Amino acid sequence: MFCRTNPRAVFLENVENLVLHDHGNTIETIIKTLEDELRYRVIGVSLDDDGNYVYNRSSLVRNSKDFGVPQNRPRVYLMAFSKKIYGNAVKLLTKSLPTSGNKIIFRDVNEILEPVVEDRYYMAQGYLETLKRHKARQKKNGYGFGYCVVNQTKSEHPLAYTILATGGSGKERNLIYQPKEGVAGKVIPEKQTPLNAEGIRFMTPTEWGRLQGFIGYAFLDENGKEKFEFPNEITDGYKYKQFGNSVTIPVIETMANFMLECFGVLEKQQVDVVRAIADNNSCFSKRDVMEILDLNSAQAGYLLRTMVDSGEILKFSRGKSTRYAKYADRLILPPVSNEDKVLTMFETRSIITNSDITKELNLKVSTTNVLLSNMVKKGLLKRLARDVLKEYTGLLKTGRILLEAIK
């Protein structure tokens, strides 16, 4: 897909374990593919003295809890910029992704809770007892796995654990203590046992939406009114799945703004280089820009068109030769192509010969003949006469053509 579309930048997200998967071989393959095969510069990745790629967990993993929402959700983020498009300018980019956001949307779990929820979100007593037994077995075996009531911790600002697309442990490790009158012992159709008497419930889909920044942030209108909603027929199970499988909006917002800043750095650097070329040369070619910035023809052409359209540089051409120069009200341009140089010769003389051109332009005789023949065909010159002269050796003959410019 990258080869087909050639985007200016790519942004990838995956679970934290990607860094360790297959003993690190998976992430290494991804980075090498981006850097070497697709020619993208990955933020957070550098080269050591031996040319090996250097990175670690802290280079690639960012956590949603650092971006204004109370969810411990570490994820791998890869952002890379095209070397084909930006050339050597990619070396100017910062060495790391943002580590935090600049907004606090919800300080802790308590701020995302709904004050009153439907009884069906309260856990059945039998289910709760099962979770207690499972946690006791895990603890006995030396593991810390098991259910968790996240707003009953000792932390001043409690956090939720990662919510998951599969629900499951994502729900059981994010239980809420919120007693409600009349719930204890209540029998409801979808539960196999009566509701628990300890005030323990699951988070609601709305609360999961807040943990991801969808509800209470991303879709608020200018008056602070919530605009996010699912279609009426969507079940709770599907809502949990969608929120658990999504990305955290405040993280993505921060990364998107960072990407825009990088674009600004890259494009400004390229423009500054072209400005410097224009300041120090009476004229220059697209090839000059391609070589200095290490760009391909299409990207150099786009950059130059942008600067021509903005009025910073001028584009001029004679025949097949196209050149650029710094904008000026009165611009005197030097001859740049051989055709230009031939025409310039007529500014000081009325007639020239092919031997004059060969000598003054330091060309081969065959090159001169092709050049003059093409200029005659274009109507730039007119052949006046042809005579045959013996050279000094008396053995070779060469044609000398008298030419004048078409007025």
Image: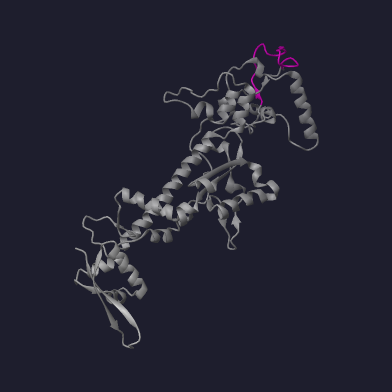
Vertical arrangement, residue 206 with respect to residue 324, above or below = above
- x and y percentages locating residue 154 in the rendered image: 64, 31
Instruction: Residue at the far bottom: name it.
Output: 393
Q: Give the side of residue 135 with respect to residue 358, left or right.
A: right
Please give the name of the residue rendered at 46% of the width and 41% of the height, measured from the top-left corner.
257
Asked if the stretch drawn in magenta spans residue 177, the answer is yes
Residue 277, image quadrant:
bottom left
> Is 53 left, or right, of 136 in this rendering?
left
Residue at 44% from the left image edge and 47% from the top image edge: 263
Query: Residue 391, relative to residue 48: is it above or below?
Result: below
Percent of width and height locating residue 312:
30, 52
- Quarter of the rendering occupied by the C terminus: bottom left
Return the residue nearer the eye: 142 or 90.
90
Q: Residue at x 63, y 28 (%)?
A: 241
Front one among 375 and 206: 375
**To which quarter of the image does residue 389 belong?**
bottom left
Q: Which residue is painted at 44% across and 25% down in the image? A: 221
Counting from the top left corner in percent of width and height, residue 268 is at 39, 51
Give 373 or 292, whichever is nearer the viewer. 373
Magenta stretch: give its range. Answer: 175-195
Magenta span contains residue 53 = no
- Asked where in the image residue 286 lies, by quadrant, the reply is bottom left
Query: Which quadrant is home to the N terminus?
Result: top right
Q: Is residue 184 left or right of residue 77?
A: right
* Most common SS among magenta residues: loop
